[in-house]
Amino acid sequence: MTAATPPPARPRAAVMEDVAALAGVSAMTVSRVLNSPEKVRPQTRARVLAAMRELDYRPNSAARVLATGRSGVLGVVSFDTTLYGPASMLYSIERAARAADYSVNIASLSTLTPRAIEDGVERLRGQSVDGVVIIAPHQSAAEGLRRLPPDFPVVVVGVGDDVPAPVAVVDHRAGAARVVRHLLSLGHQTVWHIAGPTDWIDGSARVDGWRAVLTEHGREVPEPLSGDWSARSGYEQGRRLAADPDVTAVFAANDPMALGLLRALREAGRRVPEEVSVVGFDDVPEAPYFAPPLTSVRQPFGEVGRHAFQLLLERIDGTPPPEGAGFPRRTVEPELVVRESTAAPPGR
Amino acid sequence: MTAATPPPARPRAAVMEDVAALAGVSAMTVSRVLNSPEKVRPQTRARVLAAMRELDYRPNSAARVLATGRSGVLGVVSFDTTLYGPASMLYSIERAARAADYSVNIASLSTLTPRAIEDGVERLRGQSVDGVVIIAPHQSAAEGLRRLPPDFPVVVVGVGDDVPAPVAVVDHRAGAARVVRHLLSLGHQTVWHIAGPTDWIDGSARVDGWRAVLTEHGREVPEPLSGDWSARSGYEQGRRLAADPDVTAVFAANDPMALGLLRALREAGRRVPEEVSVVGFDDVPEAPYFAPPLTSVRQPFGEVGRHAFQLLLERIDGTPPPEGAGFPRRTVEPELVVRESTAAPPGR
DNA sequence: GCCCCGAATGTTTGCGCTAACGAAACGTGC
DNA sequence: GCACGTTTCGTTAGCGCAAACATTCGGGGC
């Protein structure tokens, strides 16, 4: 052949066999160094580790998955990860997962239907994830879940009661209750509410908590107004409330809606908190800088994320599907953060 | 044997061989139905598809990766996905990826150092992703990148000039320039600036654009104040600006800082926009509801995400690493959105 | 000195899929 | 009727790793 020297053909990445050869052992020993180092004589182990470093060896995860059936990857299905809540949840789950050497595969949803959720889970399942966390505090989650095979490990974050899966939730009901008690204790006769979409569990739980406390105190329960979580919807509903002189306290189901509400009140010339008290929910990092700084409810996302991951782990390598017993459920309490947007009603 | 009937041993998930048997073909034909259906006679194909449905067959991705060397997964390395910018980028990349049947694996960073970025990429590489998008508009990105093997497909979003990888960026410089021109055209003598961290490329590009326009117009260039993107830092720097009666126009490098600034001005009794004009950057969904509604710069995240994904695809199955030619670069222009926080300076 | 035991390492096999080749079956043209 | 392309499908051989089962080796007990 007259061919020139073959191009320096980039050496294929080293595989286990290469490491074994360099270290003068068998491939199995290399595998053992990776998976149960204590079973390898320290001296041999050192040789193998040295060989790995020298060849810049990195185990092929696909091969490992194929051989073991476990991938070390978990999926997260979430609606619009641009929103503060879902983004925070995702972030905290990712951190919990990483700490346990799991990696995270995501599937964002642009619509919230049982079908979309099912698709998201199926997409991740196709990637051989070990399990899935669904961040979708929505009716659809429960619905979509029922169509999934019952033995596939799924955990749901922040969803209602009768879900056929383990659940980690913030107690929105209790959070809302705290808001209302705070306002009543300031002397308000009642509290209006700009609710989130009613098909979001978060939203309806907050409505429940709000209504329960008012009822319990024998107060009038105004018709809740409905928003869609956006500042815009808070503004629109806020204009209606601003026009009603009876309104002295409003609980918005999240901070952006509270922001919109604040603007509407300002435009109508109603002063906060002197004339109207306002409370939000979520305690976004910007809440202290609203005009005025917003009283809000802080959600312990980090904690929920850790619980969700923990539940998923248990489901993955735990006992078979808990039969009649029902699924575990971890609830964490949110915290009311009082700032300057709440005060006693006028005339007291 | 006296053993009872074996427990109904949940049938293992169907594999290709099972489908093949049921359809009366070989496994290879099943594989072909999946990967190049046009090479299979329609009639056979139909039989195979029917068998797949019947057995609820789903291809094992690990096996496919092992056999093909391609995973159909891309990694995204990002700093704090709780921030609006990174979250939006992540979301748009995920959408672009999904549209091309790619799935997305994430690695969030809690610190921004070359080391952390390198780790993030390595972690994803260990998961056999086909390539990685780095969302880290930070010096560290460039630095961390140099330590990576040059043939691993990486694309960077929103980072400076001399990066050894394809880049998709928003032209922050141009965005900042637009802000300053807008304020000058309203009659302001000069524009103060609350900058982002200087080690963030976004931040320094915005400073550059701001300074360039002022210089070009022969205006005095005040010393930029430095924030850390948070509303709190905007507030702190804002208190200093509020105390200076010469200040009539301030450009904050992002919206949360602008929010903090607005609060500081309000507390100091300086009215916006009558006495001081304020502009932000990012145009978060809440910006229209700030007090007053904030003039800001909208970033076309969707477009950048699509470009980033596109560049990555080209890098993955495109030509070998472009030698001397330099790396491709896609720049998209942000848009100034004028609202009520800007007006002519007092006394004009 | 012999046997047995456990620790340390090696061999074989298969996880589920696809690239590469090979072999039928079916025309076509002359 | 036969050589020759075209489909269409099957066979073989890995991809890289880890279970499960060998095998070797070095003592300790008697």
Image: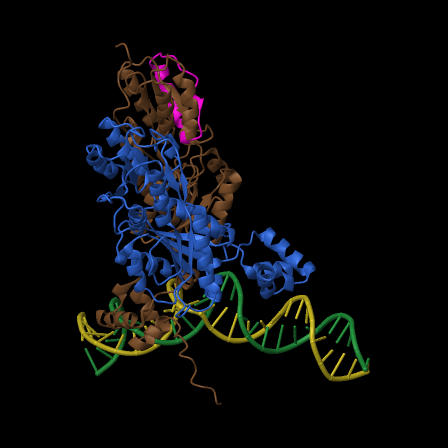
Chain colours: A brown, B blue, C green, D yellow
- Residue B329 on image: x %, y %: 41, 58
Q: Residue at x 25, y 26 (%)?
A: A339
User: Magenta stretch containing residue B84, yes or no?
Assistant: no
Q: Looking at the rendering, which quadrant does residue A342 occupy?
A: top left
Number of marks in picture = 0
The image shows residue A204, relative to residue A317, as above or below, that is above
User: Magenta stretch containing residue A220, yes or no?
Assistant: yes
Please report the bounds of the magenta region as a residue range. Answer: A204-231
- Residue A175 on image: x %, y %: 32, 27
Side of B246 where B79 appears, left or right: right
Q: Looking at the rendering, which quadrant does residue A341 occupy?
A: top left
- Residue B323 on image: x %, y %: 40, 70
- Residue A117 on image: x %, y %: 49, 42
Q: Looking at the rendering, which quadrant does residue B294 occupy?
A: top left
Q: Residue at x 31, y 35 (%)?
A: B278
Q: Quadrant of the C terminus of chain A?
A: top left
Instruction: Mark yes or no: residue A320 visible.
Output: no
User: Front-most of C4 and A193?
Assistant: A193
Instruction: Mark yes or no: residue B143 visible.
Output: yes
